[in-house]
Image (spheres, rainbow, N blue to C red):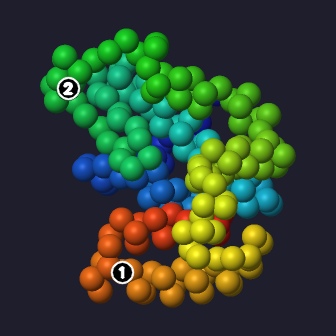
Amino acid sequence: MKNPLVGPILVILKNHPNGISEFDILKALKERLPEFSQLAEDNNLLLFRQHFLIMNALYQLQSSLWQEDNLTLHISAMRIHLVSAMQINRSDSTTLSDSVDAKLAAYYLDWKEYEKTGIDEVSHLLNSFYNGISLSGDRESALKTLQIQSTNPTKTVIKQQYRKLAQQHHPDRGGDQDLFIDLRQAYEYLMF
C-alpha cells in the first residue's frame, strides 16, 4: 500500500537539503496535516502510529528513489538526508539483506506490524525498553554511596542526600570527580 505521507515528506526533505531529524519531520507533519494527530486517543499509541507511518513512508521513499532515480536516502533518527549516487563511496556498500537497515526497513514496510500493534503492545514495548535501559547496580551499594541508613528511603530523602553530598564533592568546588560521578550514578539508580 502506498503511504500518503510520501509526498509531504518528500517536500519536507526538499526544503532541508542538509538533512532533518525524524522529530522535525513529525513536527512539520503535525503542522501541515491536523489529522496526523488524530490516529489514536492513547498518547503512546498515537506516537507509535505517527512514528510507524513516518518510517514506513521513508523506507518506501528510500526504495523508490534508489530504483528510479539512483538516489540514496539515509535514514537515522538524528538525520535523514538524500545522497546522489556520485556522492556514495563504493567501498562503503555492504550486503543490504543482512544489514540492520534492511531489518528495520522490512519491519516498517510491513503494514501488519502497524495493524497488530495496539495499546497493550505499545505498553509492553515501552516497558521492555525502560527495563532494558534500567541502570544495573546494587541497591545496597547505592544507599551506602549516598550514606543513607534507611533501606527504603523516600525519593525526597534520596534527593536531599544526593544534593548535600554533590555540593560537598562537586569538581568545581575542589571535589573528586570520580566520587561525584559515583554519587550521581547511585542517585540515578535509586530514583529510577
Disc 1 residue type (three-letter): His
Q: Is residue 101 visible?
A: yes
Q: Is residue 77 above or below residue 170?
A: above
* Residue at x-position 64% and y-position 77%: 148
Q: Which residue is mark 2?
A: 88
Instruction: State which tag comes first along the sequence, 2 or 1.
Output: 2
* Residue at x-position 59% and y-position 76%: 147
x and y percentages locating residue 66 in the rendered image: 35, 23
- Left or right: residue 42 versus residue 5 is right
x and y percentages locating residue 120 in the rendered image: 84, 46
Give the Cα separation between the discs numbered 2 and 1: 47 Å
Q: Is residue 11 visible?
A: no
- Left or right: residue 148 versus residue 151 is left
Q: Is residue 2 above or below residue 143?
A: above
Badge 2 crowding class, 10 Å Cα cut-off, few under 14, some 14 to 19, many 20 or more, is few
x and y percentages locating residue 43 in the rendered image: 73, 61
Q: Nearer the viewer, residue 82 or 189?
A: 189
Q: Is residue 21 above or below residue 102?
A: below
* Residue at x-position 59% and y-position 50%: 136
x and y percentages locating residue 121 in the rendered image: 79, 42
Q: Nearer the viewer, residue 88 or 167?
A: 167
Image quadrant occupied by the N terminus: top right
Q: Secondary structure at mark 2?
A: loop
| Quadrant housing residue 37 | bottom right
Q: Secondary structure at mark 1?
A: loop
Q: Which residue is mark 1?
A: 170
Count of numbered labels shown in the rendering: 2
